Amino acid sequence: MQKSLTETQIAAYGREGYLVPVAVMSEAEACAARATLERIEAGTGGPLRGDLRHKAHLLFPFLAEMIRHPKILDAVEDILGPDILCWNTNFFIKEAETPSFVSWHQDSTYWGLSSPDVCTAWVALTPSNLDNGAMAVIPKSHTMDQIPHRDTFDRHNLLTRGQEIAVEVDEKEAVPLVLQPGEMSLHHVRLVHGSPPNPSNDRRIGFAIRYIPTSIYQLEGKDSASLVRGEDRYGHFELEPRPETDMQDDMLALHQRLTQGAAQILYRGTGVDNFNDPRAVRG
Ligand SMILES: O=C(O)CCC(=O)C(=O)O
């Protein structure tokens, strides 16, 4: 029995590779999350950079709560089943009137996971629309295998390596995923997607939560994840604890160790081995 999505929505995700919009919190809750983020940024000296953009759910309780949000998990459970790990989280923040963009890509390219049974919940903390660089997707592209990508390391490209698909993408097919604060989109790990810069006068903030079933494993090294629902009967990942306060000393040390391990997987073969390397810092 489904938890929150209808049969039609589940079928649409399977057929098209994405689902939008799914309401998961009120606009007031999303605005409160943005305010918390901006209070943290004020304390860390500006927009989150380097390793703070990755696995920030280990450092900040409001994000630890968000990855466990019942409405997000109910929808993800309808897609992935009852035993769910949050493998990673990434902030995708486009500052107002900046050139930051996301090239056309498939998420699966460098993640090293054993199966494409991976679903991203992209949660909007601000509006995301045609005026501020909303993500766009190529429907049904998730049915293709892994497509070759080339690394550009373009510093305005928000992806780890600035990787882009090495074949022509027919942009006429692209569908923008328009979201209000508090709504999310869901997308499959092989779906081709990307987004243009934000020319508007406000930031566009998305929090991307990568969910996997517990059966999946990492092919490229040791990796970690947070058990957010159900049971882990496989033990493929080091299970992450949950922070109680912002930037606890022990969680900072753990975050540094785990994001360094993650960077070694994502940047393998490039000489970059942590998210604070100048080639890895994005914005
Ligand atoms: O935030 C964006 O525009 C792109 C996000 C993205 O590529 C992702 O969540 O995988």
Image: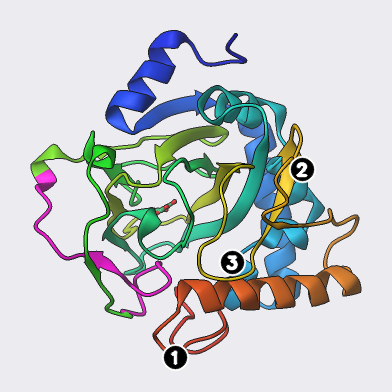
Element at label 2: helix
Instruction: Please give the range of residues in magenta.
Output: 154-171
Q: Callout 3: few (<14), some (14-19), or many (20+) C-alpha neighbours within 10 Å?
A: many
Quarter holding the C terminus is bottom left
Q: Is mark 2 within 8 Å of ligand 1?
A: no
Quarter holding the N terminus is top right
Residue 145 colored in magenta in the image: no
Q: Say left or right for 98 vs 222.
A: left
The three-letter code of the residue at mark 3 reads Arg
The three-letter code of the residue at mark 1 reads Gly
Q: Is residue 10 above or below residue 128?
A: above
Residue 271: mark in rendering: 1
Q: Residue 206: x and y, percent? A: 51, 50
Q: Which badge, 3 or 2, is on the more N-terminal residue?
A: 3
Residue identifier under label 3: 53
Residue 164 colored in magenta in the image: yes
Residue 65: mark in rendering: 2
Residue in view at x 51 percent, y 52 percent = 205
Q: Residue 15: x and y, percent? A: 29, 25
The three-letter code of the residue at mark 2 reads Glu
